[in-house]
Image (tube, rainbow, N blue to C red):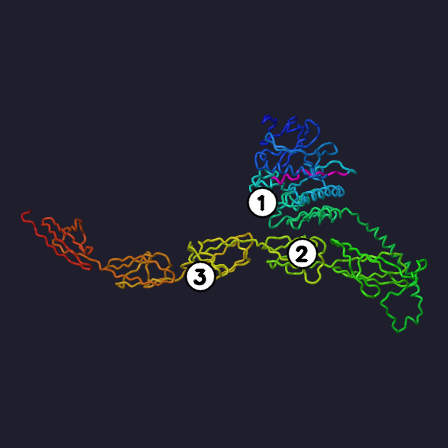
Amino acid sequence: MPEQKREGVWVEQAGAEPVLQAGTVVGHYRIIGFIAEGSMGRVYEVEHVTLRSRHALKVILQRYAADERFVKNFRREARLMANLQHPNITHVTDYGVEQGLCYFVMEYVAGADGKWMTLEDRLGGSGPMTPLPAAEILSIFSQIAEALVYCHRFEGKGVIHRDLKPSNILLRPGEGGRDHVVISDFGIAQICSDMACLSTVEAVPGGAVPADIQGVSGTPAYMSPEQWQVGNAAGPESDLFAVGVMLYQALTGAMPFQDSRALMGSHPPAIKKPSAFGRSRGWDRLVMRCLSVTPARRYHDAADFLRDLGALSRPRLPRVRLALVGSLLLGVCLAWGWPWIRGLAARPEADVGATEPLPVSSEPVPMAPPRGAAPVRTEPFPVSVQIRIAPGHALPYALPVQGELQVDQGVWHVVTLPHVVSLPGGKPSRLRLRVAGYEEPPPLVLDPAADGTRQFFDLVPLPARIKVTSNAAHAEVLEGEVRLGRVGEVLALAPFRDHRLLIHSPRHKEQVLTIRRPEPTIGEPLVMSVDLVPIPGRLRIDAMGADGYHPGKRADIYVDGHLIGHELLPFVMQNLTQETVRVALDVKGFKPTQPREVTLEPNQVVSVDFVLDYQEAWLTFDVEPADSMILLSGKRVQGDRVKVVPDLLYNVRFVSEEYWPVDQKVALTAGETRVVSARLTPRCYLRMDLQPTNAVVFMSGRRITDRKIEVEPGRFYAVEVRASGYQTETTNIWLETGESRTVSISLRKKLFGL
């Protein structure tokens, strides 16, 4: 490649971006070699010029570093990254902006062979993908989750990575032969989220960034669906989505999908569960919750993901061992109860047939202790009554310390727990406990022969009952993937535990309702109101005449009986949040339409077209003479009455053979009836009776060949008659309106040919 020098930095040109050569000095660091390239920059192995310490230098691509806003954000984020102190996050030690380069310096994470090692390399790198053993997966992803817990809670605000992927997960040898995980590039994607002018989507097939994702940052295979929407802020759920993709890779050796944009469609692709690849079913719920399309259904806290991940690592008792333990317990029970069974079998036959009922007692019947058992106490003995939360239930902020205790059907006493009670000797004692907010536990029957001086009641909290009300009557309430019920119903929640409820309605935007550690509900449920934001729709309104003519006019538009405006058709109504609307039109010249009910769809345009009926408008005619022909815009009218289209201009012409035609312009409004009157004027004719008959007639200088001439009344006509051999005769003629005249002219012969 050709070399060139730019502002004191030797570079090797590779397309539009320079690659720094070995030996180039950037700040206080000398380039040793190239390591890797990402969507935002290149990573180099460097050493400090003075201290000779080894580091990794990330240089931001120049197309970003040339923007002043980017440089400003870069300085801010670099300072933030330097404050992140966690063993599983790469430590930033220095940063700078000089010689046209933006860079930051971080610790060099070397693998077992001293080279840069990432999770991408462990999964197979550029070759076929290889799944990892379960123990290694638990180790790697537990460390990733611990780093996310720290960053998502950093300084009360949290830092979101936004570009988690295997190439950003660095691995180096750790204690016990397991890999130590270090996450790199924390906070860098935040710069891009602040820069709407940049697009940092990792290279897609073809190398070009599609126009519909300009301003979106990330790597397509690991971006959550919400990150594809420009301006949509990423949260902890977005990072956990990327963790789910990497976990799926490590478990199955395959990608769940190549591009998460497909999840935003109306039919998202189905994802095979890890159990379909031979993995334990315990992984299914963990992975599929991370890969949920809706952020509210994913883990919203990395601590919850870490807890469920840890549950998978706890060993379970094998079935064979369970069977051995069960057999041993059965043998002990048979050995202890065998004397009683043998005595029952040896009872006299007369006792078997006795009809007298046996006495019934609510107290347990004392039995003789078996041989070798401890002697029964006859004197009172103390017992410490304590409480604990039953397995599977959350602890409250503070355990209840007061309750009511009853001994042997006696009086209920209010006690502070733990409480030491003195029990009588010689017989078993029955203890009952009641604690407000908890189910009453089963009573304890204490045998005086028992050695235990501490007895525990397992408390089960009463559910926290809650009623969610909303402006959406058909909304559902979900927690994760579990449907709890509809709004307006009383829901039961586990107490003393945070809950994130998703209020879902197909016509409204989903909303998350967070309930912080609710207490058991006694009496009326806790009512919480949620106002959902409707998803608007659009309505296109148009109309056409019954004859196919588009009026192209303004119309009074009525929606649900209310006039919304006088608009030019077609008209599009925006941001309609109703489910159904009733629409009617009133167009001048047409009959008002009947209301039509239209069902709207969120984020869609629904069209409604009306067919308009013209209002009747009639023309009638009064003409003399009565036999005159009537032409309406060139078409002959039959009869003296015709229906016309309102607001159109018509030309009415009355024609009769012996009369002058009459033209009129007329336009009717809707519902109007108008009479058009016309009195035709008779035509004026001048008839010529000439001698000789072959004489030539000139009228006002124009030769006339006909002997019957139509003339206009009210004016003089100069008539000149000529014939060969005859003297020319000239006369002036005047005709009144409607007058016809016959003019007789006899020419005199010329004398002697003169």
The answer to whether residue 413 is left or right of residue 153 is: right
To which residue does mark 2 refer? 483
Q: Classify mark 3: helix, strand or loop.
A: loop
Q: Position of residue 638 (x, y in %)?
A: 33, 62
For the point 60% across and 46% down, which residue is it? 232
Q: Which mark is residue 454?
A: none
Q: Quadrant of the N terminus?
A: top right
Q: Classify mark 1: helix, strand or loop.
A: loop
Would you say the residues marked 3 and 2 are in contact, meaning their CB atoms lie under 8 Å apart? no
What distance separates the C-alpha of mark 3 from that of mark 2? 48 Å
What distance separates the C-alpha of mark 1 from that of mark 2? 30 Å
To which residue does mark 1 refer? 231
Q: Sequence-wise, which precedes: disc 3 or disc 2?
A: 2
Q: Is residue 179 magenta?
A: yes
Q: Amino acid at mark 2?
A: Arg
Q: Sequence-wise, which precedes: disc 1 or disc 2?
A: 1
**Is 651 situated above or below 40?**
below
Q: Is residue 245 magenta?
A: no
Q: Which residues are magenta?
A: 178-191
Q: Position of residue 102 (x, y in %)?
A: 61, 33
To which residue does mark 3 refer? 592
Judging depth in this view, the residue of 462 and 44 nearest the camera is: 462
For the point 94% across and 66% down, which residue is it? 346
Crowding at mark 1 (Cα within 10 Å: few <14, some 14-19, many 20+): few
